[in-house]
Structure formats: structure tokens, C-alpha cells
Image (spheres, rainbow, N blue to C red):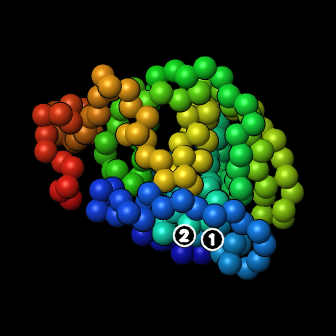
Amino acid sequence: MTIRDILIYPQDEAKLRKKSVKVKKRDESIRQLVDDLKETLLANPGAGLAAPQIDVHKRVVVVRLGQESGEMEPPRELINPVILEKGPLAKGFDGCLSLPRVVTWDTLRPSWLRFRAQDLDGKAFEMRVEGIDAILVHHEIDHLDGVFFTDRLPQDGELYLSVDTEDGHKYVPLNSLPFMGKS
Ligand code: NI
């Protein structure tokens, strides 16, 4: 298992925008990929990670569900995930390890969804998730299609930069700060 470097928006945008391909064979390279995704996610302050974020363009993501209950589950792999059914869109909290410290409460995502995926042993399963877990699964599947969370912001959507100051933790509106194109 290896902690991999996470691609960063906007400097790695071309790679993050590339569409990922379906996994056809579950061989050693897929096992390695899932291991690396899990270890990289555990080493970072996030709840999900998609293979293209470590520059592997295969339809594999890992997610830590159960946030709503206050206890995140260990990372679980979703191979070739497909959304089967989804609920109405609602505004919610979103952020991405490829855009560190930037958050929003405005992305439009399904309030619940039902999806199908496979695990490492090739077993297919279906799950229904809602709330934060639905945002998370939707966000990670988006990565496989090169869709970034900022693409899901409505016209009046706002981004915030999370900063630590002497007075504590603050969210600064991003429209007042230059950031795109800078690292
Ligand atoms: Ni992300």
C-alpha cells in the first residue's frame, strides 16, 4: 500500500477532466489501486477519493459512508459504480481533496440515490444512500466522468476558503480572494 499524490485543481485540470474507463478484469493492478486509494484517503481529511484523482483513469472510487451517524465507516471500494435511481436535487455541503480548503454549502445533488457497484471480489451489490452519503457517492462518481464539484454550483452558489487564524477557524468568501490559477 502506498500513499499517492492527489492531483490538484486547477493545475492538474486536464487529467482531472479525463473520463475513466470501466474495469473489466479484477487483477493484481486493481487490488493495488484499491489499496492505494484506501490508504491515501485515510491519510487525508476527506470522505472519498476517486482513481482519477491519483491519475489512474479507471472507474474505481473509495468512500467512507456513515458520516451522518457521526462515525465514518472504513473506506469501501465501489468498482464500476452506476446510479440506478435518484431523488430530487438539494443544496448541500461539498468539498474535494483536489481543491484543498475550498468548501461550499450550495452544490446541487440528489437528496438520495440508489446505485449498483462491484467489490474487489467481483461481487455486484446495490445500495441506497441519503443525505451526506448521497452527496459523497454522487461526488465520487462525478470524478469518473471528469465532473468537478464546482460544476454543480448554481449561478448564485458561493465558495469559501477555510482558513485557520489566530482567532480560530474561519470561512472566507472566495469571490474576494484570488485563487484560481494560483497554488
Ligand atoms: Ni472530489
Image side of residue 174 versus residue 140, left or right? left
| Residue at the bottom extreme, as displayed | 28
Q: Can residue 162 be spotted in the picture?
A: yes
- Percent across and percent down for residue 23 are 72, 66
Q: Secondary structure at mark 1?
A: helix
Dot 1 amino acid type:
Leu
Q: Report the quarter where the N terminus lies.
A: bottom right
In percent of the image, x 38 and y 63: which residue is there? 14
Compare marks 2 and 1 and give the one earlier in the sequence: 1
Occupied quadrant, residue 144? bottom right
Q: Nearer the viewer, residue 38 or 158?
A: 158
Beta carbon of the mark 2 residue lies under 8 A of ligand 1:
no
In percent of the image, x 84 and y 47: which residue is there? 125
Number of numbered labels in the structure image: 2
- Percent across and percent down for residue 146 are 49, 53
Q: Which mark is residue 56?
A: 2
Q: Is 40 placed above or below 87 here?
A: below
Would you say the residues marked 2 and 1 are in contact, meaning their CB atoms lie under 8 Å apart? yes
* Category of crowding for the residue at label 1, using alpha-carbon neighbours closer than 10 angstroms: few (below 14), some (14–19), many (at least 20): many
Dot 2 amino acid type:
Val
- Percent across and percent down for residue 79 are 71, 57
Residue beneath disc 1: 33
In percent of the image, x 39 and y 54: which residue is there? 98
Which label sits in the foreground, 2 or 1? 2
The CA distance from mark 2 to mark 1 is: 8 Å
Beta carbon of the mark 1 residue lies under 8 A of ligand 1:
no
Q: Nearer the viewer, residue 25 or 121?
A: 25
Q: Report the quarter where the C terminus lies.
A: bottom left
Q: Can residue 131 be spotted in the picture?
A: no
